[in-house]
Amino acid sequence: MSFTKLSVSTLAVMAVSATAAAARDEIRIVGSSTVFPYTQAVAEQFANNTGAPSPIVESTGTGGGMKIFCGGIGEQHPDITGASRAMKASEYELCQQNGVTEVTEALIGFDGLSLAVSRSNDFDWDLSLGEIYLALAAQVPVDGEWKDNPYKMWNEIREDLPAVEILAYGPPPTSGTRDAFVELAMHAGCEELDYVKEGGFDGDWIGENCSRMRTDGPFVEAGENDNLIVQRLEADANAMGIFGYSFLYENLDKLKGVKIEGVEPSTDTIADKSYPVSRPLYFYVKNAHRGVIPNLNEFIEEYMSDDALEAGGYLAERGLVALAEDRRMELQDAVLNGSSMAAPTN
């Protein structure tokens, strides 16, 4: 593989940091808890294929990872950060201020979170994000006040929904899936409520008041074993499960997806963003560390391999919704050749 020549400014920084950077044998990666399992899978594959030390992958969160990543160049700073959103302009500026002047952005695929029920459930489920919030949140508006959630039955959320108890099995707080569900479904659903829209509450208020799942029975933390959720949905046709789309796809003989805002979860609707509970996933490479940190280029090649990124690749088996072939090829070319990203405008 060929790599684009680095700029004079980057080479100057490398001259100062190369000795320190070369002292570290392991690749160091930080960032999003949602991207973490994909990067960890690549790290394991890379180590198995090459015999090189397995990269150190830390789940620091997207924002925390950006702060650490943009802290500078040298062995004390990570080489890559994962992100469940694009880099912000303020983060890019932090990188620039600290000498991290050339960064490659890689949109690796998409993440979709699904609600599902047993195929023996004959109701045609279609919920809005606001209705999902009202069913599963710890606190909701009741008669003009913000109170503990009183709703027990689905037909209390919307009268044409079944007169059955609300019961949803979902991931624990330690799971990246839980973090993503809170951000993409619960926060967005809370924003749909008239109480919130008319009250003029901002993002900080929503983050503080709309993030907790209820603990009084209708939402049950089912641990990290999605197979257990499938078993429970098979045992109770009225129960719902929350997990990554790939797991629903693997169990379509037993389960069916719940529409959200009229859109069924699928690889197509997740990829084109029409399915509301989906988002792009990224990682960012510090180009000044290429060719300095041992095996970094080779690790990036593994991450960009067809084996990893194709629709039938090993990352898809872990839940990543793959890019279309033309977009994947553009990604591979840009990342392998070290193309530096432009400054974000957000």
Image (spheres, grey):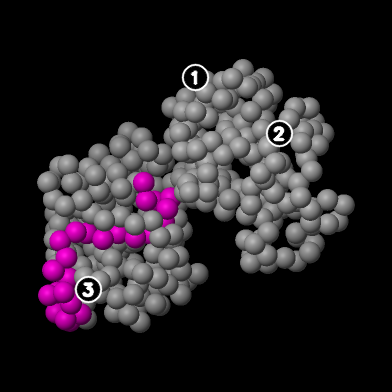
Q: Which residues are magenta?
A: 11-37
| Identity of the residue drawn at 45% across and 55% down | 84
Residue 164: where, in percent of width, then height?
75, 27
Residue 181: where, in percent of width, then height?
56, 47
Residue that badge 1 annotates? 253
Seen from the viewer's position, the closer of residues 239 and 216 is 216
Residue that badge 3 annotates? 74
| Label at residue 269 | none
Pick whichever of labels 1 and 2 is earlier in the sequence.
2
Image vertical order of residue 209 relative to residue 48, above or below: below
Q: Quadrant of the N terminus?
A: bottom left
Disc 2 is placed on an element classified as loop
Mark 1 or mark 2, which is nearer to you?
A: 2
Residue 245: where, in percent of width, then height?
48, 36
- The amino acid pointed to by label 3 is Gly
| Identity of the residue drawn at 79% across and 43% down | 150
Disc 1 is placed on an element classified as loop
| Identity of the residue drawn at 52% across and 26% down | 230
Give the number of callouts.
Answer: 3
Is 318 situated left or right of 53 in this image?
right
Residue that badge 2 annotates? 166
Is 200 situated left or right of 273 in this image?
right
- The amino acid pointed to by label 1 is Asp
Q: How far, Cα to Cα, is label 1 from label 2? A: 23 Å
User: In this view of the protein, can residue 195 be seen by the observer?
Assistant: yes
Is residue 23 part of the magenta span, yes or no? Answer: yes
Image quarter of residue 131: top right
